Image (cartoon, grey):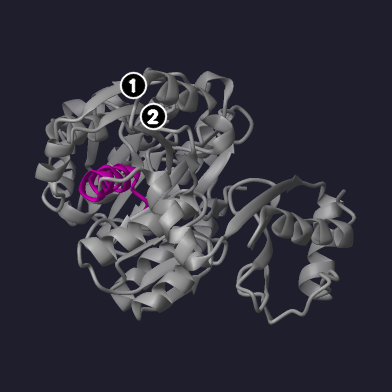
């Protein structure tokens, strides 16, 4: 079965991510477009550096062109934010990125982007799943890529990066970055986000060196995720090479990790907090902030101090971008490493976020550690711990029964302020700490996030859930 989770359809290469299923997914999207009377505009197709991505993009293009739908095609890989931006500025109905984002290298997938450059809403993907499920392989219509090209149905894009890069540069304080002269080490983690950030940083006259910037479908044997566990080499090189900043992206350029000159890893929560502070207090961008329910509550405390509101939404960036529009928020993001800013695309963008981060340290003239330490001194400590648990079908059924049917809670040894079942099970405490237990929307995992004043407090919340579910 082809299922679209929070980040699109993702599947194991050679098992479910195979030519037949990829073409079936494309046929289903074509059926959806015709049903909605939205087959009148081209579809842009992008792809990352994963194994089979470029080939899968051609297979999908062959199906669209087989239905007479022109395809805007790129001669090189591209990050997901670029495809979202193109859908937005070109006024397209649909765009597609072939990617499995930060998943292990055995995965690949299809991310569907809809009008205004947004992640496809749940209603759209559920109906798409129904359309695909009703299809058989013999229902698929396609023509060879070369034939489609000869018939003018493949619209080769000369440099689709121009508008995307210019949109970011137009709102940045490039002069401040030039005067500061940051020295940056960039790790795109063998992904597709290299080119646009390099152009922006070089335009701002930073000194930039790179590691892991070639194509490697196995990502060096590591996860293409900018987590503390995956950035050991970047940390060592930043410190030993005397760099001011280390920047890392995930495989498709929509998640960000930062290493500062001392070797300190700045996680996604800290990046969100620092950028909200910078945009609101230094650039004067007034307004609320949006986070998902597995993201730091430090944003809530900071927003209240600013006289603003922090809005909580379910996991899935589509909810963040919709709420940003609804309340005119300054920015929104999630603890997994993605954020976007008011007036930009409606999806995660590490290129813009990284550029803003370089601008911030250039304007403030402090290291990220110094900025974060100042904010911690003012708003308190907020330490998050995450636990990912694999499970069997029987264990998933047991977890579902205990947590979501019987609604049993562990004994945390302290009073519970309230509980939400909007997306998983989230337990709130009076001291702004929390723990949330939910099934992943992209991998067969049970994710437990917890935040407390200290890591041991958060670990205690997680252990309580593990004990309740007998998952030790």
- The secondary element bearing badge 2 is classed as loop
Q: Position of residue 236 (x, y in %)?
A: 49, 22
Q: Position of residue 413 (x, y in %)?
A: 84, 72
Name which residue lies at 42% across and 78% down.
304
Query: Does 77 appear above or below 400?
Result: above
Q: Residue 188, labelled with which disc?
A: 2
Magenta stretch, main secondary structure class: helix
Segment colored magenta:
348-364
Q: Position of residue 430 (x, y in %)?
A: 65, 79
Q: Is residue 353 magenta?
A: yes
Query: Does 323 appear above or below 350?
Result: below
Are the residues flagged by discs 2 and 1 in contact, CB closer than 8 Å? yes
Q: Residue 249, labelled with which disc?
A: none
Q: Is residue 445 magenta?
A: no
- The secondary element bearing badge 1 is classed as strand
Relative to the observer, which residue lies in front, 53 or 383?
A: 383
Query: Dot 1 corresponds to which residue?
Result: 210
Rendering quarter of residue 249: top left
Rendering quarter of residue 74: top left
Query: Does 389 appear above or below 35?
Result: above
* Mark closer to the chain start, 2 or 1: 2
């Amino acid at each position: 079965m082809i299922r679209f989770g929070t980040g699109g359809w993702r599947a194991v290469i050679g098992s479910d991510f195979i030519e037949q299923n990829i073409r079936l997914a494309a046929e289903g999207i074509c059926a959806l477009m015709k049903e909605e009377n939205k087959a009148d505009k081209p579809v842009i197709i992008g792809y990352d550096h994963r194994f089979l991505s470029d080939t899968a993009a051609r297979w999908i293009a062959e199906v669209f062109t087989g239905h007479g739908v022109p395809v805007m095609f790129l001669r090189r890989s591209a990050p997901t934010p670029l495809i979202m931006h193109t859908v937005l500025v070109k006024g397209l109905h649909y765009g597609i990125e072939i990617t499995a984002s930060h998943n292990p290298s055995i995965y690949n997938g299809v991310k569907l982007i809809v009008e205004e450059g947004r992640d496809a809403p749940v209603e759209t993907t559920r109906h798409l799943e129904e359309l695909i499920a009703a299809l058989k392989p013999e229902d698929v219509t396609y023509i060879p890529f070369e034939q489609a090209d000869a018939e003018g149905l493949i619209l080769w894009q000369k440099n689709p990066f121009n508008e995307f890069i210019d949109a970011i540069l137009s709102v940045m304080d490039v002069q401040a970055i030039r005067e500061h002269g940051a020295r940056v080490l960039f790790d795109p983690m063998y992904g597709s986000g290299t080119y646009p950030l390099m152009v922006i940083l070089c335009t701002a006259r930073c000194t930039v060196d790179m590691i892991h910037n070639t194509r490697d479908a196995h990502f060096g044997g590591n996860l293409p995720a900018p987590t503390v566990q995956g950035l050991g080499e970047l940390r060592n090189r930043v410190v030993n090479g005397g760099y001011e900043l280390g920047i890392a992206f995930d495989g498709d350029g929509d998640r960000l990790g930062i290493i500062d000159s001392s070797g300190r890893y700045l996680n996604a929560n800290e990046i969100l907090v620092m950028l909200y502070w910078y945009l609101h207090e230094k650039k004067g961008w007034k307004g609320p902030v949006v986070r998902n329910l597995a993201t730091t509550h430090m944003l809530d405390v900071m927003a209240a101090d600013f006289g603003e509101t922090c809005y909580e939404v379910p996991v899935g960036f589509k909810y963040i971008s919709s709420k940003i529009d609804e309340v005119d928020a300054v920015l929104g993001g999630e603890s997994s490493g993605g954020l976007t800013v008011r007036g930009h695309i409606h999806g995660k963008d590490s290129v813009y976020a990284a550029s803003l981060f370089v601008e911030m340290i250039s304007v403030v003239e402090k290291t990220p550690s110094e900025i974060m330490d100042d904010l911690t001194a003012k708003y308190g400590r907020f330490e998050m711990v995450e636990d990912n648990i694999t499970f069997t079908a029987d264990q998933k059924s047991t977890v579902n029964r205990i947590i979501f049917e019987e609604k049993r809670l562990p004994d945390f040894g302290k009073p519970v302020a309230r509980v939400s079942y909007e997306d998983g099970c989230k337990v709130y405490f009076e001291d702004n700490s929390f723990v949330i237990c939910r099934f992943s929307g992209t991998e067969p995992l049970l994710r437990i996030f917890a935040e407390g004043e200290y890591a041991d407090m958060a670990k205690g919340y997680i252990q309580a859930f593990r004990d309740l579910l007998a998952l030790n």
